Image: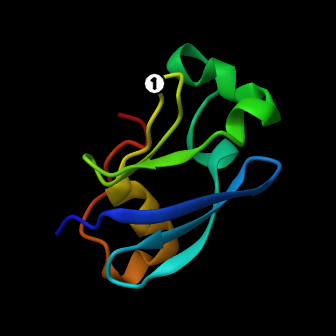
Amino acid sequence: MLHDVVDAKPLGGYRLAVTFEDGVHGEIDVAVIVPFDGVFAPLRSEAEFSRVFVNRELGSVSWPCGADLDTQVLYARIRPDQSDTQAPAAS
């Protein structure tokens, strides 16, 4: 089951507070799940990382540089007991 992200806020460092449409919420340390190279390279800058937004069309956490995170992986990090996937973090 897919779970859309409805809110994402930077918390400092490379952490995000993420809320899903079903009310599940928690913190994610992005540095643990993605390498900061390729499309993610600009996110090494905390200023760029803090420009995070929710792409409403995709229901995902995104950045202006084109990076986004797989919502299934984020959900699995917050609610491993409710996840049915072990998909890669980046899309």
- In the rendered view, how is the structure colored? rainbow
Q: Quadrant of the N terminus?
A: bottom left
Residue 40 or residue 32, whichever sits in front: 40
Q: Quadrant of the C terminus?
A: top left
Give the secondary structure at mark 1.
loop
Q: Which percent across, then down, holds residue 52?
A: 59, 44
* Number of residues whose C-alpha sits closer than 10 Å to that of mark 1, classed few (under 14), some (14–19) or many (20 or more): few
Please give left or right for residue 1 compared with residue 47 in the image: left
Is 4 situated above or below 79? Answer: above
- Could you tell me which residue is drawn at 31 percent across and 48 percent down? 87
Q: Which percent across, then down, holds residue 8?
A: 55, 60
Residue located farthest toward the left when viewing the structure as drawn: 1
The kind of residue on which mark 1 rests is Gly
Q: How many marks?
A: 1
Is 83 situated above or below 33? Answer: below
Is 22 situated above or below 68? Answer: below
- Could you tell me which residue is drawn at 64 percent across and 19 percent down? 41
Q: Which residue is mark 1?
A: 66
- Could you tell me which residue is drawn at 71 percent across and 30 percent down? 48
- Could you tell me which residue is drawn at 41 percent across and 85 percent down? 23
Q: Which percent across, then down, holds residue 71?
A: 36, 55
Instruction: Place residue 9 in its image quadrant.
Output: bottom right
Please give left or right for residue 63 compared with residue 29 in the image: left
Residue located farthest toward the top when viewing the structure as drawn: 38
Instruction: Place residue 81 in its image quadrant.
Output: bottom left
